[in-house]
Image: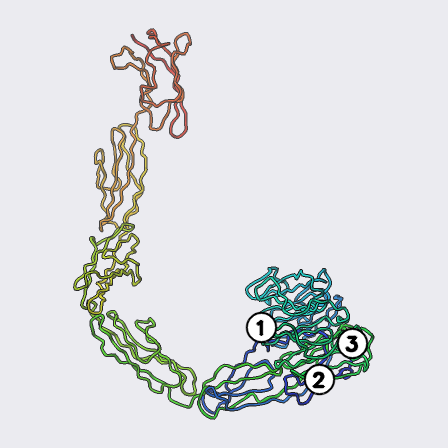
Amino acid sequence: MRFNISPGSKASEISVLCEPAMPKPLSCLFVALALALEGGAQCGYPVTLHTNKDYCVGSSLIVNTSHALQNIVWYKDGQPVASATGSQACDTSGISLPVQPPADISSFISDIASDDTGNLYIYYSTQVLKYTPGHGYGLPLVSGVYYWGSLVLDQQGNIYTLLTAGSGYEDSALVTEYLTDSPSSPSAVTSRTAVPRQQQLTDNYGVAGSLFLDCRHNIYVYFPGNQLVVKWPAGSATGVIVAGQNTYIPQCFPAGAMGRVRVDLSGNIFYMVGQAVVKMVPGASGPVPVTTGGCIDNYTTRAGTDFYIDAGDTVYLCGYDGHANSFYVDKWAPGAAAAQTILTHAQTYPPNGDRISMNMDVKGNIFLGFVNSNSLLEFRRRSTIDSAYTPPDTGSYYAVVTDIQGYTSVSDTFRVNSPAPPPSIQINATATNTPVCTPITFTATVTNVGYDPSFQWMVSGVPAGGDSAEYSYNLFANGDQVYCILRTQAGCEGPVADTSNILALTIDPQGAASVTIASPKDTICQGDTAVFIATVANASANPTFEWLVNGKNTGDDGPDYSSSHFSNGDILTCLITSDDVCGLAKSNSIPVSVDVPPKVEGGQLYTILRGQSVTLTPVITAVAGTDTYSWSPPVALSDPAVPNPIADPTSNTLYTLKVSAPGGCWDTASVFVNVYTPVRLPEAFTPNGDGHNDVFYVLGGPINSRITDFAVYNRFGTEVFAVHGGTPGDPRFGWNGSFHSSPAPAGTYVYFIEMQFADGSRQSYKGTIILIR
C-alpha cells in the first residue's frame, strides 16, 4: 500500500472512519506505523478552577485545563454532587499542514510528538523541528539525529530521541535527552538523578525499534529483531532485560515496521512479536498474547504493524490487508478473543507500502506523517462539554475530570461562602502585669469567623504559639507586645486577614530568683578582653547560665563571660535557669561602652650632630582632643608632656611616648635619636701601652656607616696595615703601630680610608699620621 500525498493534495483524498459510540477514550481512530509518546495525560495534567464572579453562592465554578475532556464529576466536601459528559465529533478527512522541512534538508518524517500547548515536534531523518499551529514551517531544535528513530517528550517538555539505525548504531541504540533550556546542545553525561541523558546500548540486541518514557523517567527500548525489551531505571546507566525471548525471527520484522513498545500505569509492558501484540506482566514467566497474528514476511495477508493502548489497556492495532489492498485499525478490548474492525480504507500500494508516523494531541486531534510524500495530515476532533457548575450552597468544591484518552486528574479546591460581614478579632489576657515566669493565657474572640480560620500569635513582632484561638506562655520580657493575626475565608471577598488589638506586658524580670551582671571596669578598650561576672540570688545551688549579646545566645553557660570582640553600644544580658519556682530569671542589661584607643606609630629614627636639636614628630591617631602625652625618659626634652617636644641629647637616646585617651585607653611607641660626630682622624698617636692614644682609628661617624677600606703605608710605599670592613669609632678596627708583629719605627706614615654611609654613598679620606715613640 502506498499513499501519494503532496502538500497540495485535497483533504478528501484520505479519510478515516470514526466509531460513533465508543465507551473508551478514542472515538476517532487512525492508522500509524510509528507512535510517539501518548502525551502527558498518562503522567497527570494540571486542572484548576476559577470563578466567573466572586467567592459567594451564585457564582459559577469553571474547569480550566488544556486537555479535551469527556467527563467531569463535581465534588462538595468530598462527596459527588454533579457530573457532565462531553460529546465528540471527528473529521473523517485530513487537512494537509504546511510543515515541510526547509528545502536544503534532505530528510523524511520518522516520528511525531506533541505537548500540552498544541505544539508539534517532527522527527525528520536528520533533525527535529518544532511546529506551532498557524506559524508555517517548523523551528529547528535538534540537529544530528540520523535515519529512523523515535521521539518522546517528558512532562517538562524535554525532548528524547532514539537513534535506531545508521551512523554505527545498527546493533545498539542511542537515547539522548535535549533540555528545554538548551535543546540544541544535548547533555553528554551518562546519567543523572532523573534519567540517563545519553547512553549507548552496546549489547547485541539487534536493531532498536522504539522508545518509551514512563512517568518515573524509566526508559524502555524495544529490539524487535531479538524480541527484547530493555529498561534503564531512572538515574541508571545499566539496562536490564524486562521482557522478550532473545530469539531472532527474520520473518517477523517486515520492512517499514520498526517495532513498538508501550507501558501502562500498572507497569505492564506491551510489545509486538511479529504482527501480534503481547503483554508482559511484571513478575510473570512470560508474555501473553492480547491480539492474534503471525510472522509473515510480506503483505499478502492481514498483518499488524503498530499499536496503541489507552488508559483502560484497550489495544488499537493498525496494519495492512494484502488481500483487500487496504489499511485497517482493529480494536482489541482487554481479554477479547476477536477484534472489532473500526477503521478500514482501500488503497493500492507497492509491496513495501508507505511508512506512516502518528500522534494524537491533548485535544484528540490526530496527526499522520507520510514518508514517501514527506507530508503531514491533521484529523481534527471537536469535543464539547459543560465545564461550568454553579454550587447551590456553601462548601469546598473540586472537580475530577477524565480526558479523551481516559486519564483522570483532580482540580484544586475552591471554597464557596455565603454573604457575611468581614471578620474581626479581639484578644484578652489573664494578666498583663506579672513577675517573670508567671503563665499568661491569651484568648482570641472572633466575630464572623468564616471558614477554616487560622491564628498566628505574635510577641513583639516574632511568631509564637500554635494555630489556636488560645495561647499561653510564661517567659515574657518586660515591654513585650502580644497580638494575633486571623486568616480566614469569609464572605464574598474570599481569603482575608485581620489583626487584633495589641496587649503591652509589664513584667518584673526578677521573679523568685535574680541575677545581676557587672564588669570590673566601666570602659573597655577596643580589642581588650573584658570579663563580666554574674551574681545570683534566690536560685538553686547550681543554676544554668545563658549569656546573650544583643539578644543572641553566645553559647557560654558559666557565671563569667569574657570577650574581646565587643562593639560600642552592644547590649549584654544574662539569663539563669533555676530549679526553684518557675526556674528563670533575667538579669539587668548592660550597654557595653567600647573606646577606640589612640594609635602611635613607632620605629622612627632621628639622626643629629652632637650639639644640635630635633623636633620629635611621631604619627599619632588621636580619638579625642583631650588626650594626654608622656615621654620617657624626660631628659633633654623641651616638654615631656606634649606630642612634639624638642630633643637635644648628647648621646644616643631611645624615647618612649605614651598617649592616653580620657577613658583610660592608651598606646605606646618608641623613637630613637642618634647623636653622632663627623668623621675625625687624629694627626698623631703614641702606641706605648699606657692606654691613651695607643691606636690610630676612625673617630666619630654617623650611625650605620661602615669602613670599607683602611690602609697605612710607610715612606717607601710599603703597606704596614690594612683592614677591610669595620665600624667607625671602634679601636678594634685601627692600627696599633706594629708591622710584622714588631713595633714600627717612629715617623710619618700615609693612610687611605674609604667610608660607606647608611644612604649608600661613599667617601674617601687621605692624609698622614705621625707615630711617636
Separation (CA) of disc 1 from disc 2? 31 Å
Q: Position of residue 33 (x, y in %)?
A: 73, 75
Which is more N-terminal, label 3 or label 2? 3
For the residues bearing labels 1 and 3, Cβ distance under 8 angstroms: no
Q: Residue furthest front?
A: 285
Q: At 79% from the left edge and 75% from the top edge, which residue is drawn?
A: 353
Q: Amino acid at mark 1?
A: Cys
Q: Amino acid at mark 3?
A: Ser
Discs 1/3, front: 1
* SS label for mark 2: loop
Mark drawn on residue 338:
2
Characterize the local packing of mark 1: few (<14), some (14-19) or many (20 or more) Cα atoms within 10 angstroms.
some
For the residues bearing labels 1 and 2, Cβ distance under 8 angstroms: no
Q: Quadrant of residue 94?
A: bottom right
Q: At 81% from the left edge and 81% from the top edge, which residue is drawn?
A: 325
Image height of 619 relative to 60, above or below: above
Q: Position of residue 367 (x, y in %)?
A: 70, 78
Which is more N-terminal, label 3 or label 1? 3
Q: Quadrant of the N terminus?
A: bottom right
The residue closer to the viewer here, 203 or 33, is 203
Q: Quadrant of the C terminus?
A: top left
| Any part of residue 281 in sight | yes
User: By what rule are the colours in the image chosen?
Assistant: rainbow
Image height of 561 relative to 692, above or below: below
Characterize the local packing of mark 3: few (<14), some (14-19) or many (20 or more) Cα atoms within 10 angstroms.
some
| Residue marked by disc 1 | 215
For the residues bearing labels 2 and 3, Cβ distance under 8 angstroms: no
